[in-house]
Image (spheres, helix red, strand yellow):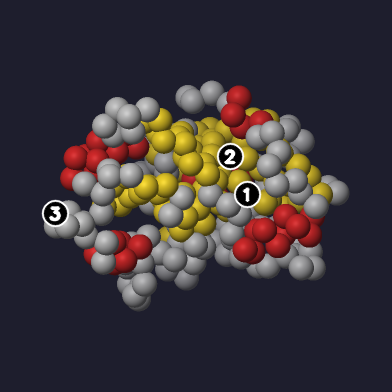
Amino acid sequence: KVYEDDDVMVLNKPAGLAVQGGSGTTRHVDGMLEALTGKDGQKPRLVHRLDKDTAGCLVIAKSRFAAATLAKTFRSRSARKVYWALVAGVPRVRQGRISTYLAREEAYDGDQRMAVAQHGEDGAMHAVTYYAVVETAAQKLAWLSLKPVTGRTHQLRAHTTHIGHPIVGDPKYFNIQNWELPGGIQNKLHLLARRIVLPHPRGKGTIDVSAPLPPHMRQSWNLLGFEDAPYDPIVDAPDE
């Protein structure tokens, strides 16, 4: 847990733990919440999702009231989210806005992926992400800070791939041929839900929490000599 009060809990979700059950998923956050049912019989509820392989801040509502209020907060895009990622290559433009339509495509292996689509295509949803380069390692890798304005499935993973800089260790979206993983960097998704800022459901100010790097990313950051707490340029990005 990185935050808790009577209404809200923010968990630091480990990479590899699913948020909800699906085919063949036995361990998931939703199931674990059953065990945290309060004295009043209210089971904590999920109000947004993270991909299984993404680590970091996951907001949980501890009461029905908080669940309803927080669901509105996420729907109206009033929750500001910042993600950190390690990507292949270094974007020429150090700060930018990625705006595309995304639609589901059925991959040959039956696995679902999101692909950049045209406006008006079946199921195409508009997606907007701001990115900023925080640090780089030679010209091989970049630490990006990402701020999604919309919350589409796999949005950050599809968007970084779209600009030619897929996230290191992404089994679905990494598409650079013959790219060699630098020694000492684990082949796991390097994506962290770093920070979330949202209004408290009962109007008690603002909840602003951050999650630490998960072990595989901490190892990469150490290896690449990245600073732990730099100025994060994404804070200057607009909210729209």
Report the residue at 44% width, 66% height from top.
Answer: 17
Q: From what the image shows, is residue 25 above or below residue 219?
A: below
The three-letter amino acid code for the residue at tag 2 is: Leu
Report the residue at 47% width, 36% height from top.
Answer: 208
Q: From what the image shows, is residue 21 above or below residue 217?
A: below
Is residue 97 visible in the rendered image? The answer is: no
Q: Please, what secondary structure does the residue beneath circle 1 have?
A: strand
Q: Report which residue position mark 2 lands on.
A: 146
Report the residue at 17% width, 54% height from top.
Answer: 42
Residue 66 at x, y percent in the picture: 24, 41
Of label 1 and label 2, which has the lower sequence position? 1
- Seen from the viewer's position, the closer of residues 210 and 87 is 210
Marks 3 and 2 in Cβ contact (< 8 Å): no
Determine the residue located farthest toward the right in the rendered image: 138
Which quadrant of the view contains residue 199? top left
**Mark 3 and mark 2: span between their CA atoms?**
39 Å
Which quadrant of the view contains residue 183? bottom right
Is residue 213 visible in the rendered image? The answer is: yes
Q: Report which residue position mark 3 lands on.
A: 40
Please indicate whether residue 117 sits to the left or right of residue 159 in the image. left
Q: Report which residue position mark 1 lands on.
A: 85
Report the residue at 69% width, 33% height from top.
Answer: 231
Please indicate whether residue 215 sits to the left or right of residue 177 in the image. left
Marks 1 and 2 in Cβ contact (< 8 Å): yes
Image quarter where the N terminus lies is bottom left
**How busy is the neighbourhood of tag 3: few (under 14 within 10 Å), some, or many (20 plus)?**
few
Of label 1 and label 3, which has the lower sequence position? 3
